[in-house]
């Protein structure tokens, strides 16, 4: 099954965990050299951050690419206050999941709800956001469904608008929720090997 396949990929990775400031941070190093870093709320197990890093053609590590979490503001440098204000008014796209939904927020979209169209593009395996006034267009995929090899379902998609923010929700398939639950169990009960650093542990795959 696809879910088992993705779990096996996670199990095959070298994992290092760090508990800090109420967060469980897990770093994955996969056999192909890719890296994934996740942060969870220690109490609720809510996913706060997921980012990826891969090596380029020359073998050098690239920049971290954010998949889930709050984008880190770029340095303002010597920009004047007017330019900073203008930049802050641009739409800001981010993903912040809940227990039962993949969820994206697009800030600084002041138009009323009936201006927006949010739909699934089956052939392209993505979600498309449009406005009838043609002021905004966004296309994005759901990597989790690709990793689990699951189809997109139009009925799982919904959206709301409040406080100049468009909130797009996609109900997680039961297969994804089951895999996430299983992963959390393994992270919490897995064998642990300390490496001498404070609160830092290496998670050892339990093959027994």
Image (cartoon, helix red, strand yellow):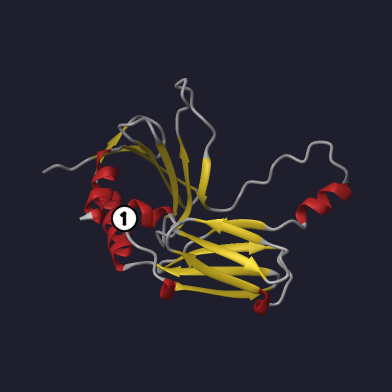
Most extreme residue toward the bottom is 114
The local secondary structure at tag 1 comes to loop
Most extreme residue toward the front is 123
Residue at image mark 1: 149
For the N terminus, the image quarter is bottom left
Front residue of this view, candidates 194 and 131? 131
Classed neighbour count for the residue bearing mark 1: other residues with Cα under 10 Å, few (<14), some (14–19), many (≥20): some
Q: Picture quarter containing residue 191?
A: top left
The percent coordinates of residue 16 (x first, y second) are 36, 38
- Does residue 58 appear left or right of residue 151 in this picture? right
Q: Is residue 23 above or below residue 129?
A: above
Q: Picture quarter containing residue 179?
A: bottom left
The percent coordinates of residue 73 (x first, y second) are 68, 46
Front residue of this view, candidates 56 and 79? 56
For the C terminus, the image quarter is top left
Front residue of this view, candidates 158 and 19? 158
Q: Residue at x 35, y 62 (%)?
A: 151
Most extreme residue toward the left is 208
Q: Residue at x 45, y 56 (%)?
A: 124
Q: Residue at x 66, y 79 (%)?
A: 114
The percent coordinates of residue 126 (x first, y second) are 47, 59
Report the number of discs.
1
The percent coordinates of residue 18 (x first, y second) are 41, 41
- Does residue 206 appear left or right of residue 35 in this picture? left
């Amino acid at each position: 099954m696809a879910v088992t396949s993705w779990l096996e990929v996670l199990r095959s990775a070298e994992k290092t965990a760090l508990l800090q400031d109420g967060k469980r941070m897990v770093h994955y190093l996969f056999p192909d050299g890719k890296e994934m870093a996740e942060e969870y709320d220690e109490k609720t197990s809510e996913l706060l951050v997921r980012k990826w890093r891969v090596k380029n053609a020359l073998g050098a590590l690239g920049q971290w690419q954010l998949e889930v979490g709050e984008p880190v503001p770029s340095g303002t440098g010597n920009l004047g206050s007017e330019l900073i204000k203008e930049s802050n008014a641009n739409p800001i796209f981010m993903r912040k999941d809940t227990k039962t939904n993949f969820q994206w927020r697009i800030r600084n979209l002041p138009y009323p709800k009936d201006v927006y169209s949010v739909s699934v593009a089956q052939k392209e395996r993505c979600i498309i956001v449009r406005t009838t006034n043609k002021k905004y267009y966004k296309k994005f995929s759901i990597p989790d469904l690709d990793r689990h090899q699951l189809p997109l379902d139009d009925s799982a998609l919904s959206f709301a608008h409040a406080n100049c923010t468009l909130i797009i929700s996609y109900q997680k398939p039961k297969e994804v929720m089951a895999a996430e639950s299983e992963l959390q169990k393994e992270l919490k009960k897995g064998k642990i090997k300390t490496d001498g650093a404070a609160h830092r542990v290496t998670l050892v795959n339990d093959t027994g």
